[in-house]
Amino acid sequence: MAANKIKETIEFQIEFYDVDSMQVAWHGNYAKFMEVARCALLHKIGYDYNEMTRSGYVWPVVDMHIKYIRPMIFMQKIRAEVTLEEYEVCMKLSYKFKDAESGAVLTKAESTQMAVDMKTKESLWACPACFVEKVRAYLESQGGSK
C-alpha cells in the first residue's frame, strides 16, 4: 500500500435489476456501485455511516466524475477498488471497476464529500478531527504515517 493511501477492494456481480433492456448496467447505478465500495472503505477505518451520525456529521457528495470505458454487463463479476485520496480538507475517493476475471478496467470514477455539522447545518472547510484521527490511526496501524 502506498504511503498515506487507504485502499479497499470488493467484488460484486451485475444483477438483473442493475441493467437496462440491452443487459448493460444502467449508467445511474454506477453511483450505487461507488457507494458500496465507499462503505467498505469507511467500515475498514472504523468510520461507517453509523459512526458518522454518532460523531455529529453528515457527508453529502458534492462532486462526482465517472469515465465509462467498457460496459458492465448482466451477470459479470466486478472487482471495485477504492482509494482514499484526500482526508484533511474533504473526503476524496478514486475508484476503478474491473472485470474480476480478466482484470480489464471498465470504469474509473472519483467522488468528493464535505462534512456538514448536523447541529448547525454548516459545511466544514476542513474534515472534522474525529475523521482525520480515524484515518491517521488506520495508517499508523498499517505502518504508514502522515
Image (cartoon, rainbow, N blue to C red):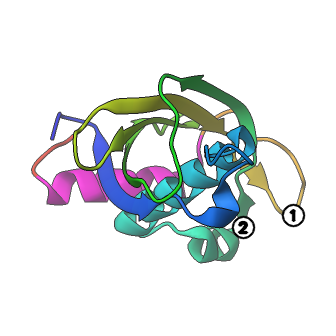
Q: Is 23 drawn above or below residue 5 in the view shown? A: below
Which residue bears the numbered disc 2?
A: 56
Give how far across and how far down residue 108 sits, in percent: 47, 28
Question: At x 48% / y 22%, what residue is drawn?
Answer: 69
Q: Which mark is residue 119?
A: 1
Quadrant assignment, res 26:
top right
Q: Which residues are magenta?
A: 127-142
> Marks 1 and 2: in contact by CB < 8 Å?
yes
Q: Identify residue type, mark 2.
A: Gly
Pick whichever of labels 2 and 1 is earlier in the sequence.
Answer: 2
Q: Position of residue 58 (x, y in %)?
A: 74, 58
Question: Which amino acid type is marked by label 1?
Answer: Lys
Q: Is residue 43 left or right of residue 19?
A: left
Relative to 100, 68 lies left or right:
right
Cα distance, mark 2 to mark 1?
7 Å
Q: Position of residue 38 (x, y in %)?
A: 51, 54
Residue 28 lies in quadrant = top right
Badge 2: residue crowd in 10 Å (few <14, some 14–19, many ≥20): some
